[in-house]
Image: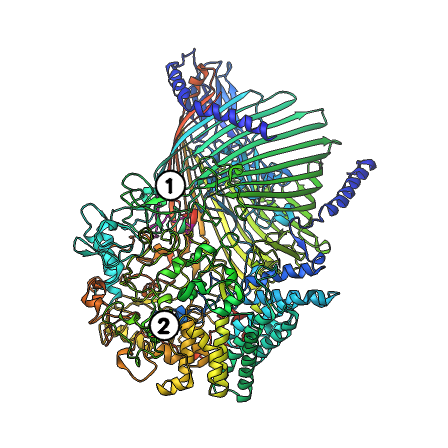
Amino acid sequence: MKNYQLAIMRSLHRLLKNGHFRPFYSFFFLLMAFYSPAIGQSSKTITGIVLDETKGEPVAGVNITIKDSQKGTITDAKGRFSISASPGSVLVISNVGFKTTEITVGNRTTLNIRLSVVNEQLNDVIVVGYGVQRKATLSGSVAVVNAKTFENRGPIANPVAALQGQVPGVIVTRTSAQPGRENWQLQIRGATSTNTQEPLIILDGVALQNSGELNSINPADIDNISFLKDASAAIYGARAAFGVVLVSTKRAKSDKVTVEYRGSVSRKLLALQPDLLVGKQYGLDFTTALNNDNYGIPNTAQNVYILAQYFINPPDSGWFDVTTIPGYNGTTTGLFYNGRPVPPFGDVKDFTFFPTNMQKILFGNATSTEHSLSISGRTEKQGYRISMSYLNDGSQLRWGLNGNNRYTLRLNHDYTLSSKTKLETNISLEKNDIFQPTVMGGGNYGVTSQYANTGKPAFTKDGKPYAWGGVYSAAAQAEYGGANKEYNSRVLINTRFTYNILKHLSFTGTAGYNAAFTDIKIQQKSIQFYTYSGLLPVNSYPSAGGVSGTSAYYQRQLNKDPYYNMIGQFEYHNSFKAMHDINIMAGASYERDEYDSYNTKTFNLGNENLPSLGLGISSSSAGFVTNGETQNHYALGSYFSRVRYGYKNKYLLEAVGRYDGSSKFIQENRWKAFYGVSGAWRISQESFMQDVKFVNELKLRASFGQTGNQGGIGLYDYVQSLNVNTGGAFLGSATSISVTTTPGLVSLNRTWETVQNKNLALDFSVLHSRLSGTFEVFRKENINMLLGQSFPAALGATAPAANIGELKTWGWEGVLTWSDRIGKDLTFSVSVNMTDNQNKLVHYGGANVLSAGYNSTVEGYSLGSYFGLKYDGRIQEQKTLDAYNAKYAPTGSTNNVSLPIPAPLANPPGQLSGLRPGDNMFKDVNGDGKLSIGTSTTNPGDLIYLGRDDPRYSYGINLGLQWKGIDFYTIFQGVAKRTIFRDGTWRIPFGNLSNAQSSFYRGKLWSPENPNGTYPNLHSGGGINTYNYQISSWSVENGAYIRLKNLVIGYTLPEQIMKKIKAIQKFRIYFSGSDLWESSHIHDGWDPETTRTAVNNERFPFYRYVTFGVNATF
Amino acid sequence: MKKVPVKYILLLSGLLILLTVSCNKGLNLKPLDQLSDVSSFASPNDFKLFANQYYGFMKNLTNFNSDAHSDGNSDLYGGGGAVGSGTNTVPTTDGTWNSNYSGNLPTGAWSRIRATNYLLAKAATYSKPADIAQYVAEARFFRAYLYFDLLQQYGGAPIVDKLLDPTSPALFGARSSRDSVVDFIIADLQAAIPGLPASLVYGSPDYGRITQTAAQAFLSRVALYEGTWQKFRAGNATRYNALLDMAITASNSVINSHQYALFGTAASNALGGNSTILGDSAQKYMFILENPKSNPAGVTKSANHEYIITYRYDDVLKPAGTNINHVMSTGFQVGRKFVNMYLCKDGLPVEKSPLFQGYAAWTSEYQNRDRRAWYNLNIPYQSYWSGNANYRIDWSGSAAELLNASAVSYNPNLGSGYHSQKWNSERHVADNFEAEDYPVLRYAEVLLNYAEAVFERNGTIADADLDKSLNLVRLRINVTNGMPPLSNAFVTANSLDMRTEIRRERTIELYMEGFRIDDLKRWHNAITELGVNVGGSAYGNASQFVSSWPVGIKYTGTQYQNGPSPWTAVASQARDANGCIILDQAARQFSEKNYLLPIPASQLALNPALMQNPGWQ
């Protein structure tokens, strides 16, 4: 299987790699050359009136065009029109909210046209679990996005990315911008548990492990995605607590053979990043901070002070070599360079003062390309769609091997075996290669770390890796530290057999196989670093010998994760007397996952240029080769059913149920039932509504149910297992093997989390369906949330998670869409959606531990709440300071708010240490006369709630315009409320002297002359900085933002031209931009979407994306 | 619906039944890569493998310098950690009082205690107790080891001697008293001793495991600690005298076992190997004893008969995994107080000895001193080598070797001006690959425990007792120096104080091994030693040795100011009345409450019955 798959991938790759856009450009020009205006026939004038079929009223503003020409007219206020046309021409009558009709003129001169009202959306077939439904008769809360969402966006690494701001109730956030590892987070209707939050994702009936698996899907293959947001998800029972996302891929639609090509090229432009301090300004501000620390007296003895002076006045060359200074004897201590003391730093050999900004050295703009080709067609017996795609996702990181390549091949095929039987097969081969430098976060100074302070070059004078003592150039680490290559491949096969046993009864059997293979090759190379002259070797990192994490090595790893499922279901559907519509479905399924991973690693390669496991220098020493293996499995058995009853398409009732059993629980506690009930009343179908002319559709929906979550449960938690560990204490003459217990205690009585789900919604469509919308309120209650229980440490183990928590989530969401037409040619649509949810951790096992900063779980509060001190203004004068100190920092007292206790100073004599004017004050909120950080909700000290990290009021504004062949589409997306407190030392100016400094404070510092400055006095290191910048109502940031998520301008060549060029049916070119503009209150320089932690690859800078693309259908 | 023939209903139900049966079977899945508890603990080897983890609990190169016991918290250093400065506050959690794991290995005190109780619980039902006696004894020894650490840090602690589960009431009980915890530790040690092997020789397969003598040695530490703690807090005399007696007996039994000897002495050679070949530098190389290339004479670890309880490393199989050279060779602000504590070679302290050369030149104060000053500290103008790049080539002192030194003609113009070289290996070794053993408990401590216990028990100590214990340590490398032994006559003749001298010896010998702050705590003089008179003198108010600040070298009027090679960079740094550079601007705030660490707040929130230690509420 693997060889076959690879062969296809390779040839596909070759084909597309060499192809690029060139043929399409020439094709485009050729096509333009064929263009010539249509030649007229003998015409006559036709008049007529357009009426609403149901209500018999004239319809104004109806568009009447002659097919294949640009001629057309609009009906007037009384529905009348007049147009000149030849007998052979076809009139196309269309209007928003009505079914488009075509009439051949013939020899008629007057026409009475009756248009049937239709809301196309209402007839849409929507995929729900184990079946489909019409939108009109839907009673659950299901949102749908169609294929259009994924078009025109330029390369999309993961389809989830395109959903941001698109679906009410679906919150999409991103955590990184690293190609292939963007890690999009998908959440439906807010947090529902502290154990995982991600909805269950089903691709053509087969469950995926997580949304990351969508990385390898070709977004152009997606036909639609349904989001089951309420109790209707209960058909997926134990995994439905966070909603269900059903992804369906495209199948052949028309009986004509259609070949479609899409190609685009995009440029990633670096967007928001903190601005780092460089050069003289760095020296000046650093000196200020140090002088402030030392009570205004320059501490000229301090090595960093001496260093800072060099930044203010660097040598002309920008650097100097210490080893050439006479008297150098291994340390820089006591040396002078041109009469100035050399900063005493143990083992460094040179000093460099270049105005370098590692962020700018590391990251730049990049290019991505995507090609996708599909062929589909249908004959009497069978339909097929074959698609291929190639994505090359460029990386902003300029050094080392980087990027993300995706190759996909998919065949969706159906075959009608007989009048009663049908077989559908989907086969998808996907390959996703993600490359990155192995040494990414090396020490504090790696690519995704805080970077070393300015001044240091990335490379030496002669281009070798530069290091300053133990500070290794991040760019050189990425460039020379070896590559981490991850080859993901996936085979997804899904076969569905349908047998119509009787007219109304059918059986469907589905077998799915989703096997993911990840082959990882990591080589970590040793890098020899040099001083700036390039003459003196400094250190090697990673080290050449040895067996530690920072040694050179070569590693291979193979993960296999096959997932099988089998589903059998019966469906009975019948209508009686055109009033009663009954649909009953029942089935069973078995799903199983078997994870298997092994890795082997060899240190001491014979030759670093030939990484191969066989070439590790064999060594008698243990540890030079290490092996690892992990195996586990789980299974889920289920019965499920759906019963639907509709009365005159007016009253709709539906019940779904599922009975799930999981291998993760002990046999006695294994099975549990879940259910959902929903009903809808189509008010607009009532006779009394027939006179309410402006209402086209009005539907009230309600649902409730119970869904489950098995997240947070280990695979074998009910068995006490022991681990075998090697490399333990050195006993006798070898390292020992030890057996240890697992940290967690066994649990026999726990069960699934149960989420009670309630939903109330109103769907409406008015004014000839021009204005439509949905408004929903929901309430979710996780009544037995699985929580890690906190017990006193004396327990000595981790208590098993128990079903002891309760989390309430409530919120609303709405979408309002206005679609209309202005004049003959301009159609537009504006859609606004917004989602809000709140949650409260009602019970958290009684544990009420609280700390300053981010708290993931605090009883009585939202998940992810921030707590901190209350800012009480800035100390402006000594009098205030003395009073503040006397109250909160008397001699001999202690506090845990990092408030320094004033103590007599040796130098200058008579002065006290501690705060100065220009530092922050905090409020004694609880009035106990002290400033303190409490430890629990019952004893919060002076902590106050500062907001939550999860966004509130997520919204999207979509605007679409079409005018003749031109289309314009834009999405604004944003968050109206969020609190954020970013970790990391860039938050505090000079908080860590060895790291790069962010310059956000510049020009906004407090000083006696600028008493309203935003930021307090500069200080260095911890101490007062820790106090001033600790979490408080002053230091948290407002995370609200709005951004232009996407903008598309496209042009489709007119149909007449296409007619001439028979080879092409449709040709469209477009320009698209993503994240082009934003507005936010963030002042630390990071992108407003950056996570609060901003660690590791979350530090990859976000980018703006501009795309040029073509779509062609043949 | 009614039209559906029976056969289809049967087919449907049949299918469902089939699925039910196969489903339930398909849901019984057992772990694939772990052992089951049920099938383990069937043979003595199972117990041994389980007990092996305990040896990872011991203090080692990774943590000895960063835990609450480390010298960085003591008066020997400038600056000092928060614990020693008394500026620590109640933490939410801390590294000790918890039940954490690192991977599968327990790291917190309570998870480790559980690991000992786990074995004891399994042993209770084992059919042949005699076969597993050694491992049961190890479990009890290590339970005592863990509880002693808790005792030193927090005082009383809940006594957990069985496996608890979330329903155990004991979880929410009060802490047992300090006395009960001490009795529990002693009971465990005494119960462990019979089950342990009497001795284990280097090279035997079990070498490195705890022996009877090792348990006795540890008992001497515990008993002396608590005996003096009680004595200096006006405790019950009967109790503390009993504890001191126990310390005397235990340490004496180690001495009388003749299994151990000080490295670099003839007694050690008699036990095997040749360590006297290293001469005066024997003690220095003991701490960095690795493979034969780690010292000038090719001595190996087999010649070390001083380490009684050892966290062992191996240059190939188990390297340190921490950059001990780098950590130990930089960044420490050794204080003047400690340097002043070294005796002059006439056995007299600096404030009394005519041999003391003052501070005028960089090297003056190092003249005529206890040889250990030369091997613990970096002496100006000497050459030093260190690990990765600046290693010794052949110990010849050749030009090539000097060229490779990290410091040729050492210049002390950095930090406090006093620098440490202990633990700093000289051989060619990559960072993190050092492999010197860490002495959790060494013979020298047992000897010093003996001397101190005898003195504190009786208020006096006979010369014979000093000679069999303290003087061996004192004179190990000071014989050639001509230093006189400590004797009652010498004390009297020079108006010294026996207790001060015993304590001085302990401080000098066990420097950088994590004893000082705990010693000050049990002597109940930490407030004085840390808070006031830092950098002071033992005898008289010799003002030139006294300072109210932690200080480094004397700058004013010495070579540091006047040159050659003046230290101009510190010219602006604050200095005390003697002209010594002040290392820490803010005064220390160690107070009575600081003798015990606070219980972490989160643990108090979980179990308020623990009660916070006095002064921390």
Q: Secondary structure at mark 2?
A: loop
- Mark 1, mark 2: which one is toward the viewer? 2
Q: Residues within 10 Å of mark 2 (few under 14, many from 20)?
A: some
Quadrant assignment, res B413 = bottom left
Labels 1 and 2 in the same subunit? no
Chosen colour scheme: rainbow
Q: Where A93 sits versus A739, above or below?
A: above
Q: Judge from the rendering whether residue A742 lies leftward or rightward of residue B509; answer left or right.
A: right
Question: Residue at image x 25%, y 64%?
Answer: A292
Q: Which secondary structure, mark 1?
A: strand
**Residue B13, image quadrant:** top right
Q: Which residues are magenta?
A: A1074-1095
Tag 2 subunit:
B
Membership of A1082 in magenta stretch: yes
Q: Amino acid at mark 1?
A: Tyr
Work out how far the residue at label 1 is from the one at label 2, CA to CA, in angstroms.
72 Å
Please state which of residues B546 and A80 is positioned toward the viewer in this rendering: B546
Residue type at numbered disc 2: Asn
- The residue identified by callout 1 is A1103
Q: Residues within 10 Å of mark 1 (few under 14, many from 20)?
A: many
Instruction: Identify the image quadrant of residue B183.
Output: bottom right
Counting from the top left corner in percent of width and height, residue B238 is at 55, 88
Q: Magenta region, mostly helix, strand or loop?
A: loop
* Foreground pick, A269 / B425: B425
Say whether residue B372 is left or right of residue A546. Answer: left
Work out whether residue A1067 or residue A745 is closer to the camera in this orientation and state it.
A745
| Residue B409 visible | yes
Looking at the image, residue A531 lies above or below residue A1003: above
- The chain letter for the residue carrying disc 1 is A
Pointer 2 residue? B481
How far across and how far down the image is residue B367, in percent?
Answer: 30, 71
